[in-house]
Amino acid sequence: MSTRYRWTVLVMLTLVYTFNFIDRQILVILQEPIKAELGLSDAQLGLLTGFSFALVYVTAGIPIAWLADRSNRRNIVAASLAFWSLMTALSGLVQNYGQLLAARIGVGVGEAGGSPPSHSMISDYFPLSHRGTALSFYSMGIYIGVLFGFAAGGWIAENFGWRNAFFAIGIPGILYALAVIWIIKEPPRGQYDIGGTPPKASMTETIRCLRSRPTFWWISVGCAFTAFVSYGNGNFMPSFLMRNHGLSLAEVGAILGLISGLSGAAGTLLGGFLSDRLGVRDIRWYVWIPMLGGLSAMAPAYYTLLGSNTNLIIAAMIPSQILGALYLGPCIATCHNLVSPGMRAMASAILFFVLNIIGLGLGPLTVGILSDQFAGRFGDNNLRYAMVSTLTISLVGVFFLWMGVRSLRRDLNANQSAVAEAQTAS
C-alpha cells in the first residue's frame, strides 16, 4: 500500500468528518432565525443542538461500532454519510419544533456510523508512530466543518433563508457517499500491529478489556469535560456575538468560520504532531499535551467572554481555539493503543459515548438553562455569565486527564502482555 494512497484515504475520510460537522454545526449558526420563526427558548435550543442529538448519537454508535469491528467499515461510513446528509436536507422542510427535533435525531443516527469505523480504518492504514498525527489530521474535519458550516450557513441563511441552507449543505453529502465507495478500500485489520490480523472480539471481551484499563476511562471523562465546555460555549458563541456585540448573522458566520475553523484545525494537527514527536521520548506526552492545552486555553477564553472590545475578543479566540483543540487526536490514539486492533471501533464508540453524552449532551443544555435562569439577574448579560460559569469546568477535564497520565504506562504494558498471550494461544 503506497504512502500516497494512505493519505488519499485519510483526506477522504477527513472530508467525511467535515460533512459530519457541517451538518451538525449548521443548526448552531441558524439557531437565531430558527428561534425567531418557531418561537423557541434557549433551553430548547440547547436540547436541540445538544442533549437530544447526543443521546441518539451515542446510543446508535455502540451497535454500529460492534458491526464495524466485524464487517466492511468503508460501507458503513458511506451509508451513514448518505443517511445523515439526507436528514440534514429534510431539516429545511420542517414546520415546527417537533419536526425539527425528529430530523436532527435522524442526523444523529447517521453520524453515529461515521467516526468509530473511520478511526479503526485509520489505525490500520498508519503505524503506531504516525497514528497521533493521522488521527489529528482526521479530527481537523471538526474545524473545517465548523468553518464551512458557519461561513456558508450564515451567508446562505442571510441571503436565501435558513431552510435553503439545510438543502445546500445536505445534498452534496449524499453524492460524496458514492465517491467513498468508489475510491476507498477496506484495509487489513492490524497490518501495522504486532501479530497482524487480530481475532474478532465480542462486545463482552471488549468491555472486559476496557474495564481493566482505567487509563481509558480517565481519558474518556477528561475529553468529555473538555468537550462540555467547547460544545456548550461553542454552540452559543454565535448567539453571544449577535446579542452582546451587535454582529449580523453573516458577520458572525464569517468570523467564527475563519477563526474557529482555521485555528481549531491548526491546534488539532499540532496536538497530533507534538504528541508523536515528544511521545517517542515519553509516551505520557500523548496526555500531557491535551492537559497543557486545556489549562493554557482558559485565560484567552475568559477574556473572549468578559472583554468589551469586539476586535480584541475576536483576536483572543485564536489562541483559545488553538490550545483548546490540542486534545482530541492524541487522546484517540492513546485509547487505540490500549486495546487490540479488533476492538478499536468499539473503543472509539465508547470514548465518543462518554465524550458526547457529557460534552455535547449536557454542555449546550447547561448553558441554555443557565442563560434562561440568569435572565432576571443579569438581563442582557445572561448568556455571557452562563458561558463564563461553564468555562470554569475546564479544570475538571484537566484533572481527569492528569489521573490518566498516572496509569498510562501500566495499562499500555498490560495491553502488550494481553496481545502476546493471545498470539501464544493462537
Image (cartoon, grey):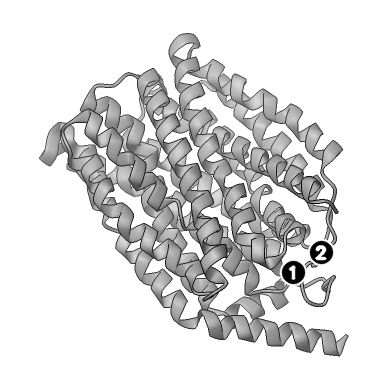
Are discs 2 and 1 less than 8 Å apart at CB?
A: yes
In the image, 262 versus 363, the foreground residue is 262
Question: Element under label 2?
Answer: loop
Q: Is residue 364 visible?
A: no
Question: Element under label 1?
Answer: helix
- The percent coordinates of residue 34 (x first, y second) are 42, 23
Answer left or right for 367 relative to 337: left
Q: Which mark is residue 189?
A: 2
Q: How many marks?
A: 2
- Which residue is the site of mark 1? 341
Q: Amino acid at mark 2?
A: Arg
Q: Residue at x 24, y 38 (%)?
A: 383
- In this rendering, is residue 65 above or below 78? below
In the image, 257 versus 177, the foreground residue is 257
Mark 2–mark 1 distance (CA, rounded to whole Å): 7 Å
Residue at the left extreme, as displayed: 377
